[in-house]
Amino acid sequence: MQIAERLAKETTRDYALRILKYNIIMLELKPGSIVSENELATEIGVSRTPVREALIELSKTQIVEIYPQKGSVVSKIRHNLIEEARFLRLVLENAVVELACDYASESDLEILKESIKLQEFYTENYSPDKLLEEDNKFHKYIFEICNKVQTYSLMDSMTAHFDRVRNMSLHTVKDIKIVEDHKKIVSAIENKDKEKAKAFMTKHLSRYQIDKDEIMEKYPDYF
């Protein structure tokens, strides 16, 4: 697993939750794998209780399955949950990108453009993990522009199945389109063109459907 440092004021339970979720999305904890509370606690460097609490929280979104007296399993990826998560993002992000056309300042646009430059760097010097991280920051900042941070947090807590597939796509598809998508989204926000902003966001969030066959071929055992 990849273990990050604990954040200031982060509870032990929230720290365990963040680390476990990150490693599930990044496929360090593979779909279908059995996980041990004791082993996870030792590796993360916390006691067993916050790990158990984190697994229970993850089970609420069906990313982990808990079997009493037997242990926990990282859920395999289910197409219906991918589609539900994508639907959630589509509804919320289309709404927020429309708001961004009204709220985005020049400094906001510069931050989004700087993010795109970093995405281009990680595309040219290919780093899928960093690219996914910067992709997440890009989308989160659009919510921040519109003062919808809590909405983003709620959405983020429910889209792990879709996020795993986004990660697979970055490791599978050679012709990456997300940076070009982001450029078009920023251009539409800058021009205050709400219809184009929503159209580009819809296409961007639908790329899983375009890449589905390649992803399934590379990761058949994860579904």
Image (cartoon, grey):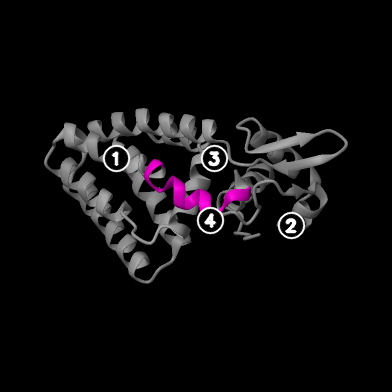
Query: Do the CB atoms of the residues marked 3 and 4 lie less than 8 Å apart?
Result: no
Earlier along the polypeptide chain: callout 3 or callout 4?
3
Question: Can I make out residue 158 in this image?
Answer: no
Q: Pick the quarter of the image with the N terminus.
A: bottom right
Which residue is disc 3 drawn over? 161
Among the two numbered marks 4 and 1 on one chain, the one whose residue lies closer to the N terminus: 1
| Label 1: element kind | helix
The residue labelled by disc 4 is: 218
Q: Residues within 10 Å of mark 2 (few under 14, many from 20)?
A: few
Mark 3–mark 4 Cα distance, whole angstroms, equals 17 Å
* The stretch drawn in magenta includes residue 147: no
Q: Which class describes the residues within 10 Å of circle 3: few (<14), some (14-19), or many (20+)?
A: many
Q: Residue flagged by tag 2: what amino acid is it?
A: Gly
* 3D distance between C-alphas at marks 3 and 2: 26 Å
Pick out the residue farthest to the bottom.
125
The alpha-carbon separation of the residues under discs 1 and 2 comes to 41 Å
- Residue at (82% x, 51% y) in the render: 38
How crowded pointer 4 is (Cα within 10 Å; few <14, some 14-19, many 20+) is rated as few
Q: Which badge, 1 or 2, comes first in the chain's sequence?
A: 2
Secondary structure mostly seen in magenta is helix
Mark 3 against mark 4, which lies toward the viewer?
4
Q: Which mark is residue 45?
A: 2
What is the x, y in percent for residue 74?
Answer: 68, 44
Magenta-span inclusion, residue 213: yes
The front one of 17 and 28 is 28
Query: In the image, what residue type sits under mark 4?
Result: Lys
Could you tell me the amino acid type at mark 3?
His
Residue at the disc numbered 1: 203
Residue at x-position 39% and y-position 55%? 134
Residue at the far right in the pictured view: 69
The quarter holding residue 139 reads: top left
First to last magenta residue range: 209-221
